[in-house]
Amino acid sequence: MINWLRTPTAPEVAKYVERYWFLEKQPGSHSYQYPKLNPDPTGHLIIAPPEQPYHYELDTTSAKGEGCHWIFPHTQTFRLDHSQPFFILGIKFRTGALYSLDVTPEQPMLDQVTAADVNHLLNSEAFNQTAILAIAKDQPDTCRDILDELLLPWLFNNREDQHSKLTRNTLPLLAETPVSQLGDRFHCSQRTLERSFRRVTGLTLKQCQSINRLEMMLEYLYQRDLQEIDWVELAYQFGFSDQPHLIRYLKSTIGATPNVYAKQRDLTIDIYGGVVSAIK
């Protein structure tokens, strides 16, 4: 297994892109074949070889294709087909960033995986996915610099409005501030803030806060063995009213009770380790 992550060095790119990441499953690897991808409020542009298949399942629907594709923000858990060797280069955008960019289909979109024409997106024939994937395997810093250069003209041609600015200012406060108090922080009504946030991200404030909390909890669990986990303490630590509340929440989001998940460890963070925990 080969993986890495890098953050953009160009400030204009970092405004919209949180990080770049690379993941490869080599022939002979015995990692879990069908990991789950838990909810994520951010969008990812996946760069892959043209002939490499992808397959995502969500409840009764699925998305299949080959090559480059978008994983848009999702409130549900996807099941991935990683049964064959693969390598992918990912661009993780910041929450709400796609709203300000020229992306087809028009944003926000939730719980969708769609094909992506990266040359058309960047309006550049300079993008060669085969070449950049070859560089990504062995030269992560060089790959980061190339991506910064390729993305900069597209990201510079953005659409910033009052809704995107309000949302960007709100996001850092979600971790510590009750949702009901956020409107007062920006001297606007709660309804105005909610409408702007949903217009930009497709999510309610509570949905985004809940997904971020889930991610922190999964990172916490990833670092601990089953016998180290006190579920009652964990429930209170992450803001649940009691253990039954935590059980209902995990069943609704990742499809498993806490104990079942802790034994299976079948999410991408468990299969691919640190690179995915940092990606998310």
Image: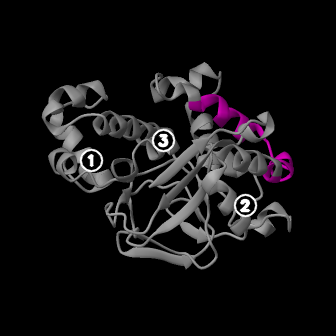
Residue neighbourhood size for the residue with mark 1, other residues' Cα within 10 Å, grouped as few (<14), some (14–19), many (≥20): some
Residue neighbourhood size for the residue with mark 2, other residues' Cα within 10 Å, grouped as few (<14), some (14–19), many (≥20): few
Instruction: Say what secondary structure mark 3 lies in.
Output: helix
Magenta stretch: dominant secondary structure: helix
Which residue type carries mark 2? Val
Label 2 to label 3, Cα distance in Å? Answer: 21 Å
Res. 250 mark? 1
Q: Which of marks 3 and 1 is in front?
A: 1
Which residue: 77% across, 58% down? Answer: 102
Mark 3 / mark 1, whichever is N-terminal: 3
Which residue type carries mark 3? Cys
Which residue type carries mark 1? Leu
Queried whether the magenta region covers residue 161, the answer comes back as: yes
As displayed, is residue 77 above or below residue 204?
Answer: below
Spot occupied by residue 239 in the image (x, y as percentages of width and height): 31, 28
Instruction: Say what secondary structure mark 2 lies in.
Output: loop
Determine which residue is flagged by label 2: 103
Spot occupied by residue 120 in the image (x, y as percentages of width and height): 80, 69
Q: What stretch is highlighted in magenta?
A: 150-171
To which quarter of the image does residue 45 belong?
Answer: bottom right
To which quarter of the image does residue 209 belong?
Answer: top left
> As drawn, is 72 to the left or to the right of 264?
right
Res. 208 mark? 3
Q: Nearer the viewer, mark 2 or mark 3?
A: 2
Label 2 to label 1, Cα distance in Å? Answer: 32 Å
- Which of 80 and 1 lies nearest the eye of the viewer? 1
Q: Do the residues labelled 2 and 3 touch (CB within 8 Å)?
A: no
> As drawn, is 122 to the left or to the right of 36?
right
Which residue: 81% across, 61% down? Answer: 122
As displayed, is residue 235 above or below residue 30?
Answer: above
